[in-house]
Amino acid sequence: MTEEQHLTTQDQHYQEILLIKIRIIEMLEQRDFSGIREWISSFPPPYQAEIIQMLQSREQGIIFRLLPQKKAAEVFEYLDISSQEDLLKALGQNEVAAILNYMSPDDRTHLLEELPGELTKRLLSLLSPEEKKIAQTLLGYPENSIGRLMTSDYIAVRSEWAIKEALDYIRTHGQDSETLNVIYVTDGNGKLIDDIRVREFLLAPLENKVESLMDYQFIAMTSLDDQEEAVHVFRKFDRVALPVTDSMGILIGIVTIDDIIDVAEEEATEDIQQIAGMEALEEPYMTTSFLRMVKKRGVWLILLFIGEMLTATAMAYYEHEIASAVVLALFIPLIISSGGNSGSQAAALVVRAIALGELSFRDGIKVLKRECLTGLLLGGILGSIGFIRVAFFASVFHTYGDHWFLIASTVFFSLVSVVMLGTLSGAMLPLILKRVGLDPATSSVPFIATLVDVTGIILYFTIASFLLKGVLL
């Protein structure tokens, strides 16, 4: 599908949702509640959530009350946090309690950790004793750990069971499981010993033991593992769910691909915002307060502005050279912007490669060699273009006088040096930050550009002083 076709499909989808919204408002005015219940139930939960989010708070509450409790909880999980908060305020205590008790543990944990502490305590009090215990356990894990994402809704069988016995157990208890793609095998102490795809159960003779399907090879994560690590594991092993164990190997839950996709999206958003030269937003753009937005953007802008002051200081240091050969000032934007652009490219590529698990600090030497050659070639290309430009203007317009060749050579060698510097800085700084435990995305594009601006000025005038000494300087 082309980008144009994708946009057309999005427009059509939005128009469909808009028409549905108009129709629902008309039915609400006519008080046709049974018609609304029947009509909206014909849509899948993600569509229902999208429709509800387009309505006013009062209308959202009415629609939610028309849905069966279990269906309402399922739709609630697809709403964004701000819409969920609005609905919690609009619904009665019994309705909120029903939704929270029916919600999957992982989605409920995500909601509770985003809410203010007092509201979280109040909502926890509405849960049944069993669900409250689960919620408090998940909230007790460190922030950004796998424990916050896992759910206890899974199916585990014993190795000594017959296939028929296992299938009967799956039919009885599988309805509330988050996924049935994989069935987990535990020993008598609850320790995970294998995971088996459900298709293998369906194809095996009923009289065989579960053990006959086992190879004792499985991938698992512990509850304290970082969520970012889970993204890499899911991508590497192409899984829809992974078991989660404690430090002793006891199976305590599973984490599913839908939650990992959310984590990957959040991490990518953070990286993009940090690469742009600002602190990452914890909330969506439209719900972030004005003062918080200014603070997030202002801190980095001030730091970058102070950094750019060093560029002015460097230029002031070479004031004599600029006064002696004003022509040098003409090429300053050309030189420093080329270095900043090459550094931005390298930084973006390396930061993304680190995020995808393609690079680590031990690859630093390989990256250094690769970017050194890349910077040399790119610098040579840009330097050649700059040399030709000077030569052309000198021959046609006689712009640079008798010493045009030295000026062109200064531009050539400066571009080669600055582009190489920018490329190496952009490539190596993220790896160094990763090594010391910092976020590589903080070596943002503006930060690299500012760094290269200052050093580019120094390199440019150092080369000019060497080549033009006794001629123009």
Image: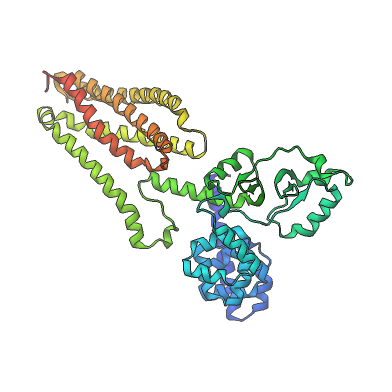
State the quadrant of the N terminus.
top right
Q: Is residue 278 left or right of residue 252?
A: left
* Residue 317 percent across, percent down from the top left: 14, 33
Q: Is residue 471 left or right of residue 390?
A: left
Residue in the foreground of this view, choosing between 324 and 245: 245
Q: Quadrant of residue 304?
A: top left
State the quadrant of the C terminus.
top left
Residue in the foreground of this view, choosing between 409 and 181: 181
Q: Which residue is drawn at the image coordinates 63% and 65% (left, top)?
A: 131
* Residue 296 percent across, percent down from the top left: 35, 54
Looking at this rendering, what residue extends furthest in the right direction?
207
Q: Which residue is drawn at the image coordinates 51% and 67% (left, top)?
A: 120
Q: Which residue is drawn at the image coordinates 27% and 23% (left, top)?
A: 412
Q: How is the image coloured?
A: rainbow
Q: Is residue 11 left or right of residue 131?
A: left
Residue in the foreground of this view, choosing between 3 and 61: 61
* Residue 76 percent across, percent down from the top left: 59, 65
From the viewer's perspective, is residue 316 above or below residue 28?
above
Q: Quadrant of residue 373?
A: top left
Kindly tell me whether residue 291 is visible in this rendering.
yes
* Residue 176 percent across, percent down from the top left: 71, 60
